[in-house]
Image: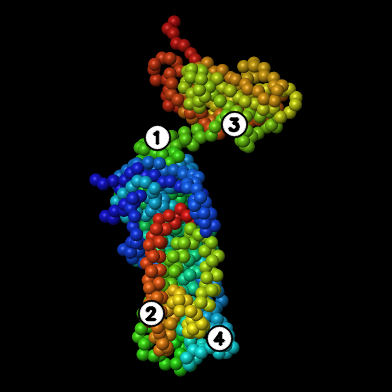
């Protein structure tokens, strides 16, 4: 059977500064190019060779960080913007909902806006009329149908808008982050409606969301976009965890000085963090249990006095519970800081954490007063490993700490 | 089952008219929206359709009819001027309103697919409401001044159609051009002002062109409204009409309309990226 959506080698290029065309701009550009051919024009590939297929009746999730190309992909599928290269085939009546309430006019009444919005979305007046009562019921604004919608609360507008869109009855529905708006109850209603569309009526839904819960509940398949490229296609949980890694492993830790969310008196600040793999000499945020690492902290002092430093790193699991902590004072280390900058290292012979993502909270005390405290902007994604060198399964799928121990028969 | 193919290689020259006809309800509702919104919460409502042309008519009558006492060939001046103003009002409405329409509906265009041509075309429908009102007003004035129409009146619908085509052509051109060259937002109001002077609205074309050299006389009719208004007067009053001049205006209108569709189609694809 033909897939509902087939995307082949899809690419989209944006030319930066293209928007600033004006008569002056064009004239100047043409005059310049008279003298000298070519110019500096910066390309940006919002989508780069994307291929995928969506089967009929599937709820297909698209996840990725901001700027990954999700919206561009939806805009191409919705025919709002053309692709630079490639081809898309869609089998079935398609409708897209990139924003709730597009085309609503504040001066018109709820009733008039239902017709306006419905026809903008591709329905005929008769189709809107047939669905009218259902739309009004679902939205729950029946009392205010003849009030101009500028008098509506934003919640009412969203409800009305989603109701219109939900009753489009397309065979393929393309939905962007629309569930971010509206109250929790209504969001639930929307998610239910979308899941009904696919399970009861065999509609195909393409769905972009940052709401991982919604993606997990709704989607049967998912893909991950990163910097315009498709990096994963398949199982939803796997896609979400890939997306989490992307979202968290994005920022460089070498320079933390720009982070503003800090506690403490700031006499001494943590300005850099790195975790060095002792086998490869590379820095990594994906340590393997049982391997040895050296963690480096760059510190910067903003007062003239020499101070006593106490550094600690707490490892918190997904839920935010503290799993373990590394602390210079606890191990009896004395660090005294006289110069303005200092690099401190902490040696870990056997990395002790089970696989999974960990938030790192660094706490720095100077002369026993809290001087600086930050949560690292990237999570540490601990890999699975053989901590006990036993070639047995060492990882039981939950976050925690390995404790070195030995068994014997007495 | 409907199959949609989006291909970076496809290049269509003309808009997809079949698809356009599927969106005729949107076309009607957009026109209704504009009409409603324009008079929503105004005290005088629909009366505004008459007030503006009435004032212009009053001024024109005062300057050209009384002060200059222009030769209209025996036609009472208010009736004469109104016959030109009907076409010109529609034309200037589309120049300013349709020209801005794509930009003004930018939010919609960035978020939803529909044939974009619906937007400027719906302005053409809104303008027709005013056009029709002034036409009724015009007929009333003909009765008051007891001007009986000539036998050429049967051709009037042809000229009404010509006005619609020529004005739509300009409107579509401007709507697509304004996206790329925002400067037109400044230029168009200025063009509309000049247009009233270089178009035979307040005076018969002979008043201007008799003082021009031959080549410039032809050039005057490159303004499509000029020939069309002459045609309207020919059909209503039976004033003389030089066919050659009418044909220049008709040819320009046709070229404007057809090329506007081609240019619009070309721009339609990238509108969302440019807005």
Q: Pointer 2 indicates a residue of which chain? A: B
Picture coordinates of residue B124, whole percent (x, y) = 43, 71
Marks 1 & 3, CB-CB < 8 Å contact = no
**Is the same chain shared between marks 2 and 1?**
no
Q: In this view, does A269 lie to the left or right of B250?
A: right
Residue that numbered label 4 is attached to: B64
- Looking at the image, which residue is at 37% across and 46% down? A85
The nearer-to-camera label among 1 and 4 is 4
Name the image quarter holding residue A326: top right
Residue that numbered label 3 is attached to: A255
Q: Distance between the residues labelled 2 and 3?
A: 78 Å
Is residue A212 visible in the rendered image? The answer is no
Q: In this view, does A382 lie to the left or right of B156?
A: right
Is residue A81 visible in the rendered image? The answer is yes
Q: How crowded is mark 2: few (under 14 residues within 10 Å), some or many (20 or more)?
A: few
The nearer-to-camera label among 2 and 1 is 2
Q: How far apart are marks 4 and 3 (CA)?
A: 77 Å
Residue that numbered label 2 is attached to: B244
Q: Residues within 10 Å of mark 3 (few under 14, many from 20)?
A: some
């Amino acid at each position: 059977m033909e897939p509902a959506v087939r995307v082949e080698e899809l690419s989209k290029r944006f030319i930066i500064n293209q928007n600033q065309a004006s008569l002056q701009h064009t004239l100047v550009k043409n005059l310049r190019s008279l003298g000298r051919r070519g110019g500096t024009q910066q390309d940006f590939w919002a989508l780069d060779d994307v291929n995928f297929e969506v089967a009929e009746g599937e709820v297909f999730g698209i996840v990725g960080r901001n700027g990954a190309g999700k919206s561009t992909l939806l805009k191409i599928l919705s025919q709002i913007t053309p692709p630079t290269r490639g081809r898309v085939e869609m089998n079935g009546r398609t409708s897209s909902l990139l924003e709730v309430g597009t085309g609503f006019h504040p001066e018109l009444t709820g009733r008039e806006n239902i017709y306006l919005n419905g026809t903008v979305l591709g329905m005929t007046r008769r189709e809107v009329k047939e669905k009218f009562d259902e739309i009004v019921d679902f939205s729950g604004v029946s009392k205010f149908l003849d009030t101009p919608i500028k008098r509506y609360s934003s919640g009412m507008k969203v409800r009305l808008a989603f109701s219109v869109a939900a009753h489009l009855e397309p065979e393929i529905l393309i939905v962007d982050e629309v569930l971010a708006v509206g109250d929790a109850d209504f969001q639930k209603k929307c998610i239910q409606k979308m899941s009904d569309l696919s399970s009861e009526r065999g509609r195909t839904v393409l769905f972009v969301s940052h709401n991982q819960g919604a993606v997990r509940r709704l989607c049967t398949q998912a893909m991950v976009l990163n910097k315009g490229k498709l990096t994963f296609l398949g199982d939803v949980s796997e896609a979400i965890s890939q997306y989490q890694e992307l979202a968290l492993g994005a920022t460089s830790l070498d320079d933390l000085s720009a982070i503003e969310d800090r506690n403490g008196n700031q006499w001494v600040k943590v300005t850099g963090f790195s975790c060095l793999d002792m086998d490869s000499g590379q820095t990594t945020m994906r340590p393997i249990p049982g391997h040895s690492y050296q963690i480096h902290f760059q510190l910067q002092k903003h007062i003239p006095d020499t101070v006593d430093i106490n550094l600690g790193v707490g490892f918190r699991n997904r839920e935010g519970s503290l799993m373990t902590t590394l602390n210079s004072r606890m191990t009896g280390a004395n660090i005294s800081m006289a110069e303005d900058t200092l690099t401190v290292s902490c040696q870990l012979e056997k990395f002790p954490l089970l696989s999974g993502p960990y938030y790192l909270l660094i706490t720095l005390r100077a002369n026993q007063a809290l001087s600086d405290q930050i949560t690292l902007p990237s999570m540490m994604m601990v890999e699975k490993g053989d901590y006990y060198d036993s070639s047995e399964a060492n990882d039981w799928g939950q976050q925690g700490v390995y404790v070195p121990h030995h068994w014997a028969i007495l | 089952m409907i199959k949609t193919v989006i291909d970076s290689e496809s290049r269509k020259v003309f808009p997809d008219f079949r698809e356009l006809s599927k969106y005729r309800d949107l076309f009607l509702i957009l026109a209704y929206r504009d009409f409603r919104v324009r008079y929503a919460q105004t005290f005088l409502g629909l009366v505004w359709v008459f007030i503006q042309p009435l004032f212009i008519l009053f001024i024109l009558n005062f300057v050209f009819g009384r002060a200059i006492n222009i030769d209209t060939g025996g036609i009472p001046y208010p009736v004469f001027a109104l016959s030109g103003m009907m076409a010109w009002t529609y034309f200037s409405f589309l120049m300013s309103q349709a020209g801005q329409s794509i930009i003004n509906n930018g939010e919609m265009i960035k978020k939803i697919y529909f044939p974009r041509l619906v937007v400027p075309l719906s302005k053409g429908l809104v303008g027709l409401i005013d056009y029709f009102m002034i036409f009724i007003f015009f007929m009333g004035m003909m009765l008051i001044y007891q001007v009986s129409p000539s036998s050429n009146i049967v051709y009037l619908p042809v000229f009404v159609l010509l006005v619609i085509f020529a004005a739509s052509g300009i409107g579509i051109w401007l709507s697509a051009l304004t996206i790329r060259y925002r400067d037109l937002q400044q230029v168009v109001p200025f063009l509309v002002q000049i247009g009233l002077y270089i178009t035979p609205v307040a005076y018969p074309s002979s008043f201007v062109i008799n003082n021009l050299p031959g080549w410039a006389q032809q050039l005057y009719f490159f303004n499509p409204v000029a020939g069309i208004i002459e045609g309207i007067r020919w059909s209503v009053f039976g004033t003389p009409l030089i066919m050659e001049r009418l044909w220049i205006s008709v040819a320009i209108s046709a070229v404007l309309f057809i090329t506007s569709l081609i240019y619009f189609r070309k721009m339609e694809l990238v509108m969302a990226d440019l807005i």
